Amino acid sequence: MIAVKVENIVASTTFADKLDLDAIAHSLEDAEYEPEQFPGLVYRLKNPKTATLLFRSGKANCTGAKNLEDVRKTIDIIAGKLRKMGVDVYKNKDLEMVVQNMVAIADLGSELNLNEVAMGLGLENIEYEPEQFPGLVYRIKEPKVAMLLFGSGKIVCTGGRKAEDVSIAVEKLSKELNSLGLLR
């Protein structure tokens, strides 16, 4: 089993029917809100180390967490702060957390010849332009993820919604490369 390390989780939730971002920006220390630049308010937490984008619609996106517990903790902390300001926040049980994307890294433990990998995996499944970018992009349909493969054997996997998806994808890739004789 190849070790897979989650580096970032992007998750969404809805705190309320609507949010007054101007009032929140004035009440929340360290909130960043510049509506001329971007329609959302950015609120960063130090523990867990995350950033959350809050929108007038009441929706929010949390990014930077490395595990689902930290996403939940971030949502709970922000919900608590909004409630203290008098915002009519949904009850915690109704604060649904939907993972939109996970970014994870893995190491195949072997250098790769990306030209051979590109040919072996089939040009219809990959994007590889070494003059533009040093990695090869490999997309698989099930689970639906994209993997960046580098000559060092390191992989960045994105698009998964569960850690298991990422692990399954990396194992599939490893087996496929092994069967093609491309792992040394």
Image (tube, grey):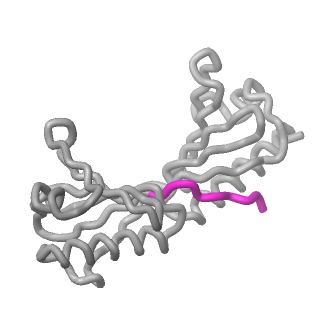
**Magenta region includes residue 119:** no
**Magenta region includes residue 2:** yes
Q: Position of residue 76 (x, y in %)?
A: 34, 76
Q: Where is residue 110 in the image (x, y as percent from the top left)?
A: 84, 42
Q: Quadrant of residue 143?
A: bottom right
* Residue occupying the point 23% across, 52% down: 41
Q: In which quarter of the image is residue 39?
A: top left
* Residue occupying the point 41% across, 56% down: 63
Question: In the rendered view, does 48 fall on the left or right side of 98?
Answer: right
47 vs 134: above or below: below
* Residue occupying the point 46% across, 67% down: 47
Q: Range of the magenta residues?
A: 1-9
69 vs 5: above or below: below
| Camera-side residue of 83 and 69 | 83
| Camera-side residue of 1 and 55 | 55
| Camera-side residue of 112 and 14 | 14
Which secondary structure is most common in the magenta stretch? strand
Question: In the rendered view, does 25 fall on the left or right side of 131?
Answer: left
Q: How many numbered discs, if any?
A: 0
Q: Position of residue 85 (x, y in %)?
A: 15, 73
Quadrant of the image containing the C terminus: top right
Instruction: List the single residue furthest toward the top.
Output: 131
Instruction: List the single residue furthest toward the front.
Output: 29
Quadrant of the image containing the N terminus: bottom right
Q: Position of residue 18 (x, y in %)?
A: 11, 64
51 vs 76: above or below: above
1 vs 105: above or below: below
* Residue occupying the point 67% across, 37% down: 149
